[in-house]
Image: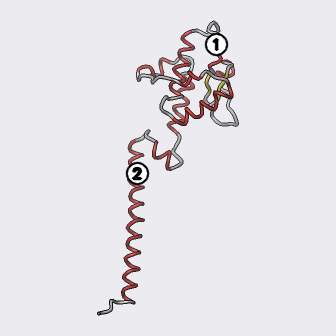
Amino acid sequence: MHLFCNAIEMVTGESFDGKFSYLILAECCYQSSELYEEAFIEENLDTLRILLPEHDKDRKSWFRNQLQQYHLDPAANQNSHLSTASRQIELFRCWRDRLVILKQVFDDSEPQTIKQWWSDRRSGVRCATFWVGFVVVLLTILFDLAQSVEGALQVHKSYHPWKAA
């Protein structure tokens, strides 16, 4: 995520290092409200609410780092939750195309680590299939280990039988 004070630079869709980037108009742009229409400012704030959810710890940590670097308004991350009706893509005039691209990139991405698989809730069927497979492999390893220990005990007892007292 990159922050910009230049709306033209943000709208042009420049990417960094050949990777897809999503950009946010920094809070410093709102200092002079005569430059932008109220609807544009509201749409940017709604976009911030979507991109910086209030309960996402990683995003809060990222934003704290950006606060010092870009001298942002700390209230920009104090976003309230957008209702489902307010998140409809038709309501976004300026950032609709960017938000659609972000949604596509998000939907096309695959979890890479166990932590990502644990927290990924996009596809219930895929998630359930992964966890059923994970449990089957775990149980297979557990039962194989138990069978190996039992076999080792049987071999040990066959060579060292109980001695009668």
Residue at the disc numbered 2 = 131
Q: Nearer the viewer, mark 1 or mark 2?
A: 1
**Above or below, 35 relative to 9:** above
**Above or below, 39 relative to 163:** above
Q: Which mark is residue 63?
A: none
Image spot of residue 104 (x, y percent): 52, 33
**Above or below, 41 relative to 135:** above
**Earlier residue among tags 1 and 2:** 1
Image spot of residue 46 (x, y percent): 51, 20
Residue at left offset 68%, top offset 28%: 69
- Is 139 left or right of 73, judged from the image as shown? left
Please rate how many residues cluster around mark 1, counting C-alpha atoms within 10 Å: few if below 14, some from 14 to 19, many from 20. few
Q: Could you give the CA–CA distance between mark 1 and mark 2, rounded to whole angstroms?
A: 49 Å
Q: Residue furthest front?
A: 165
Number of callouts:
2
**Above or below, 87 relative to 40:** below
Q: Amino acid at mark 1?
A: Gln
| Numbered disc 2: secondary structure | helix
Image spot of residue 13 (x, y percent): 65, 26
Report if residue 25 is visible in the image.
no
Q: Which mark is residue 31?
A: 1
Q: Amino acid at mark 2?
A: Trp
Front position in the image: 100 or 149: 149
- Is 65 left or right of 111, judged from the image as shown? right
**Circles 1, 2 touching at the beta carbon (< 8 Å):** no
Dividing the image into 4 quarters, which one contains the N terminus?
top right
Please rate how many residues cluster around mark 2, counting C-alpha atoms within 10 Å: few if below 14, some from 14 to 19, many from 20. some
Front position in the image: 54 or 2: 54
Dividing the image into 4 quarters, which one contains the C terminus?
bottom left
